[in-house]
Image (tube, rainbow, N blue to C red):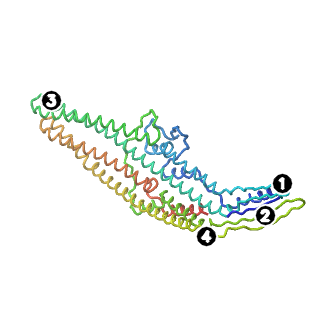
């Protein structure tokens, strides 16, 4: 609706009307824009958050010290402060702030003036935007809900980045340990080659066995070189994710340590994820905004003009008032209402799809974590100790001439394969844990948080932001 006042008087009357209209906007809902929303949410979920880095600048958070080794949490904090792609998405929150402020503004009054000329009387028409005031509360509610939707989606983007950084960090840490294992394998092959040469000189074995030992040594040398390149590639990927591509100091991850995360049943994890995941909360805000748009669509066709007319002629001034309204016979925004209702329907189905995806993410990651933990326990506590003892016995026996080279080769291969499998399972554990924490929406070092408290806090926040 737009209510128009038509005036034919001096400009002081217009000034009085404008002043009387301006306070009206102060009584309506105001835009609720929390500029610290993303930073605050990511801080409690990951321990880090964006720091407003300027374009083309790199910053290392104050509590991150690269010289003593880079921890996983430090890598996440650095990425959230530096990653250019993530920083670019944060601009969406500023845009949503602008939309919310714009939705709260009243349309400017407009003035149409006919000056008196000859026998024609003067006429001044002011169009005051009362329609924008009447629709303002609903528009502000829509904008506020869109702001929260975008904010929660940006928090989810931050969680996705944290997951990617943790996976990349695990890959680099595993690559370093695989490189160390390759050096250990090379040392073992070299020692076996030396023993075969000595036994060949003593006439205990044939030259064919010495050739096989030298071939194993050369293969171990090539594998060690490949692993060094694997470390360089993993380091470059992690540096890109944390936004320190021009850093001269090499990234040195700390030795791999499988986190002691309490194993929690899937039902509790799913309940926490549904209460905690920001993309699920964002979907709820989408439904709230779409529902408000649906209500607003039912009033968009209304238009009422209030008319105040003042005419100045030779020796007289006539003042009159009236109303002008559109008659909604044909257009009552029927198409817009249908579209708005279907947007609500689409938002509800999208929320259900996110719900199903959360359940699938939690179940998959939890089972992968359990599988990696079980495999790692068997390899570290049962298989590896037995093979270490067998390898030592075989090497001593081969050096003393009582063990065949084939047995030494078999035992050595089993030992190295087992250590490689242990590293693979550590990597699988780290990746699964990163996926599970992303699926749940926060750290799991302390186990599952109080879901009832989370749901209550989320409900209160939702109600306060939509009023």
In the displayed structure, does residue 429 sit left or right of residue 324? Answer: left
| Residue tagged 3 | 198
Mark 4 vs 1, N-terminal side: 1
Q: Is residue 52 above or below residue 365?
A: above
**Mark sitting earlier along the chain (2/1):** 1
Dot 3: element: helix
Q: CA distance from mark 4 to mark 1?
A: 41 Å
Which residue of the protein is positioned furthest toward the top in this rendering?
A: 201
**Residue at (34, 49) in percent of width and height:** 428
Q: Which residue has dot 4 on it? A: 330
Q: Any mark on residue 203, and which?
A: none
Cα–Cα span, label 3 and label 4: 103 Å
Residue at which label 2 appears? 308
**Left or right: 97 in relation to 66:** right
| Contact check, label 2 and label 4, Cβ < 8 Å | no
- Specify which label sits upstream in the sequence, 2 or 4: 2
Place of residue 35 in the rendered image (x, y in percent of width and height, measured from the top left): 59, 51
Asked whether the residues under the numbered discs 3 and 2 touch, taking CB atoms below 8 Å apart as contact, a structural biologist would say no
Mark 1 surroundings: few (<14), some (14-19) or many (≥20) residues within 10 A = few
């Amino acid at each position: 609706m737009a209510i128009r006042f038509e005036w034919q008087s001096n400009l002081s009357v217009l000034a009085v009307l404008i002043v009387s209209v301006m306070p009206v906007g102060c009584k309506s809902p105001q835009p609720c824009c929390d500029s610290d929303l993303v930073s605050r949410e990511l801080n409690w979920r990951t321990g880090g958050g964006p720091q407003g880095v300027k374009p083309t600048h790199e910053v290392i958070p104050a509590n991150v010290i690269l010289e003593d080794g880079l921890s996983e949490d430090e890598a996440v904090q650095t990425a959230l402060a530096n990653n250019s792609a993530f920083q670019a998405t944060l601009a969406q929150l500023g845009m949503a702030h602008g939309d919310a402020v714009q939705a709260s503004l009243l349309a400017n009054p407009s003035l149409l003036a006919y000056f008196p000329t000859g026998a024609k009387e003067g006429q001044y028409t002011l169009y005051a935007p009362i329609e924008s005031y009447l629709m303002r509360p609903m528009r502000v509610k829509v904008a506020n809900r869109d702001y929260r939707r975008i904010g929660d989606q940006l928090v989810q983007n931050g969680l996705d980045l944290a997951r990617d950084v943790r996976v990349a960090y695990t890959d680099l840490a595993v690559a370093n340990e695989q490189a160390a294992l390759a050096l250990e394998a090379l040392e073992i092959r070299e020692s076996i080659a030396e023993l075969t040469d000595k036994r060949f000189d003593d006439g205990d074995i044939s030259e064919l066995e010495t050739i096989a030992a030298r071939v194993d040594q050369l293969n171990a040398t090539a594998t060690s070189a490949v692993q060094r390149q694997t470390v360089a590639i993993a380091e470059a990927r992690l540096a890109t994710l944390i936004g320190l591509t021009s850093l001269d100091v090499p990234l040195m991850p700390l030795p791999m340590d499988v986190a002691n995360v309490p194993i929690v049943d899937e039902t509790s994890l799913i309940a926490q994820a549904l209460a905690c995941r920001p993309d699920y909360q964002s979907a709820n805000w989408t439904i709230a905004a779409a529902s408000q748009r649906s209500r607003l669509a039912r009033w968009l066709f209304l238009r009422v003009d209030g008319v105040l007319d003042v005419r100045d002629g030779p020796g007289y001034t006539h003042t009159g008032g009236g109303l002008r309204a559109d008659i909604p016979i044909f257009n009552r925004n029927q198409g817009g209402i249908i579209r708005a209702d279907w947007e609500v329907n689409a938002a509800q189905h999208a929320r259900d799809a996110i719900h199903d995806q959360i359940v699938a993410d939690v179940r998959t990651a939890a089972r992968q974590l359990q599988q990696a933990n079980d495999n790692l326990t068997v390899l570290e506590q049962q298989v590896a100790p037995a093979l270490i003892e067998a390898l030592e016995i075989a090497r001593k026996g081969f050096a003393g001439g009582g063990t065949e080279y084939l047995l030494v080769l078999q035992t050595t291969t089993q030992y190295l394969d087992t250590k490689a499998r242990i590293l693979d399972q550590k990597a699988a554990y780290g990746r699964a844990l990163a996926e599970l924490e992303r699926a749940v929406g926060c750290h799991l070092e302390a186990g599952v948080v109080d879901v009832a408290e989370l749901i209550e806090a989320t409900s209160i926040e939702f109600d306060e932001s939509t009023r």
